[in-house]
Amino acid sequence: MITLSHVDKQYRDHHALNDVSVQFPEHETTVILGPSGAGKSTLLRAINLLERPQAGELTIGDLHLNFADNLTSKQILKMRRQTAMVFQSWNLFPNLTILENITEGPIYVLKQSKEAAETRAHELLKQVGLDDVANRYPNQLSGGQQQRISICRALALDTDFILFDEPTSALDPELEAQILRILQDLAERGHSMIVVTHNMEFARKAADRIVFVEDGQIEFAGTSKEFFEEPTQRIKDFLAAMKL
């Protein structure tokens, strides 16, 4: 379980997160929805401390921290190791092969043997239909292929949660559909995932829970069924706008 309590993040002219408290259960897919600029990505990035709120608390499993404290690098790293992040742009290491990109974390962070890390990497590559590109470099792959590799890299770290920040926003519709099918498959396998997306079809099909963010506040946190079948007027308006 991930718990954020009374989290506050302010920029000079923007209150990105305003006293946010929310929970993300294990072995479920939670989709974060909301209009542009609502605070969705800030909320997600606060979980792995890519964004540092000025106030509030974060708990992941048995680990706990207060954002207002003077956190050490050791504390931050320990918390970050509980999650893996997949970004809008794939952020692969251009000088490493696909296999090396996936095994880098397990070998140097998790201290796995090279043999074990490579065996797991090949298993993951087979799952996404890309084992034949293991020895290529990122610039030899399409955007959709690179995003699939990013997902493999996150899965290889064997973390409690995987965080996805608009993982299909840089892709065309056909490639987006490929990535969403992979995410839906991961959801059906019971992976713990938190996904920021604008894709309502994916949210409806794959999400166990929906968190709706607007103006830096949580306006809804509940089941996907409640969100889509028993919406408030504000959520009705949002869903109608997303169909345009």
Image (cartoon, rainbow, N blue to C red):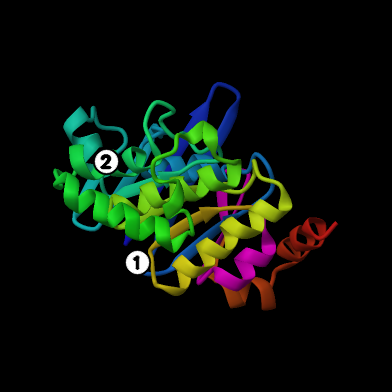
Q: Position of residue 102 (x, y in %)?
A: 34, 44
Which of the labelled discs sits on residue 190, or is there none?
Answer: none
Q: Where is residue 144 in the image (x, y as percent from the top left)?
A: 59, 47
Residue identifier under label 2: 105
- SS class, disc 2: helix
Give the quadrant of residue 234.
Answer: bottom right
For label 1, count other residues whose C-alpha is less than 10 Å away and answer few (under 14), some (14-19) or many (20+). Answer: some
Residue identifier under label 1: 26
Query: Do we see residue 20 in this rendering?
Result: no
Q: Earlier in the sequence, mark 2 or mark 1?
A: 1
Q: Where is residue 62 in the image (x, y as percent from the top left)?
A: 19, 56
Which segment did they paint magenta? 198-219
Look at 23% across and 45% down and name the residue there.
Answer: 106
Look at 18% across and 49% down and name the residue there.
Answer: 115
Closer to us: 175 or 77: 175
Q: Are marks 2 and 1 in contact (CB under 8 Å)?
A: no
Of the residues shown, which amino acid type is indicated by label 2? Gly
Of the residues shown, which amino acid type is indicated by label 1? Glu
CA separation, marks 2 and 1?
23 Å
Query: Do we see residue 157 in this rendering?
Result: yes
- SS class, disc 1: loop
| Quadrant position of the N terminus in the picture | bottom left
Q: Where is residue 122 in the image (x, y as percent from the top left)?
A: 33, 55
Relative to 206, 156 lies left or right: left
Relative to 218, 93 lies left or right: left
Magenta span has 244? no
